[in-house]
Image (spheres, rainbow, N blue to C red):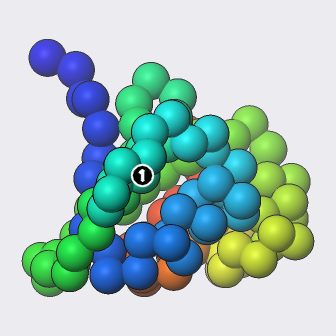
Amino acid sequence: MRLARVILFTPQIEAMAEFYSQVLGLKQIAEEKGWREFAAGSTTIALHAGPSSPGRKGPKIVFHSNDVAALRETLVARGAKFGKVRQGEVYCLCDGKDPDGNPIQLSNR
C-alpha cells in the first residue's frame, strides 16, 4: 500500500487553493468543480469543497526541508503564518496553519 493523497474539506476552497499554490508553492495538478489537487512530493494534497469536521486533533501535513529556517522565511514572506523554528538535538521543526486552521509543519526529519 502507498499513500495516494490527503484530502482536506474546506468551506473556502479558493482561499485554500491560493495558499497551497501561491504561498506554499505547490503545483496544481487538477481542478474540477469543488476540487483542487496539488503535487506534494510522492503524494498529493487535495482540497474538497464542503465543511470540514475534524476530530479533536486532526491530521498535520508535514513538508520536508533541509533548511527549515530558510523555508520558513520564504513562506512567511509570501503570507504564510508560522511560529518560531524549534531546533532539537536531532531535528528542526516549525509549526504553522493554513487558512482553515489545519496544522502544517516544516521539518528536516
The part of the image, by quadrant, that contains residue 81 is bottom right
The residue wearing badge 1 is 36
Q: Is residue 69 something that shows in the picture?
A: no
At which x and y percent is residue 40? 51, 36
The part of the image, by quadrant, that contains residue 61 is bottom left
Q: Residue at x 64, y 54 (%)?
A: 21
Q: Residue at x 30, y 38 (%)?
A: 5
At which x and y percent is residue 106? 61, 55
Residue with the most extreme front position: 33
Asked if 107 appears above or below 69 in the picture, the reply is above
Q: Nearer the viewer, residue 102 or 107?
A: 102
Q: Residue at x 44, y 39 (%)?
A: 30
Q: Nearer the viewer, residue 3 or 32?
A: 32
The amino acid on which the numbered mark 1 sits, given as a three-letter code, is Arg
Q: How many marks?
A: 1
Q: Residue at x 56, y 42 (%)?
A: 28
Q: Nearer the viewer, residue 55 or 79?
A: 79
Which quadrant: the N terminus?
top left
Asked if 12 appears above or below 46 in the picture, the reply is below
Q: Is residue 36 left or right of residue 94?
A: left
> Under tag 1, what secondary structure?
strand
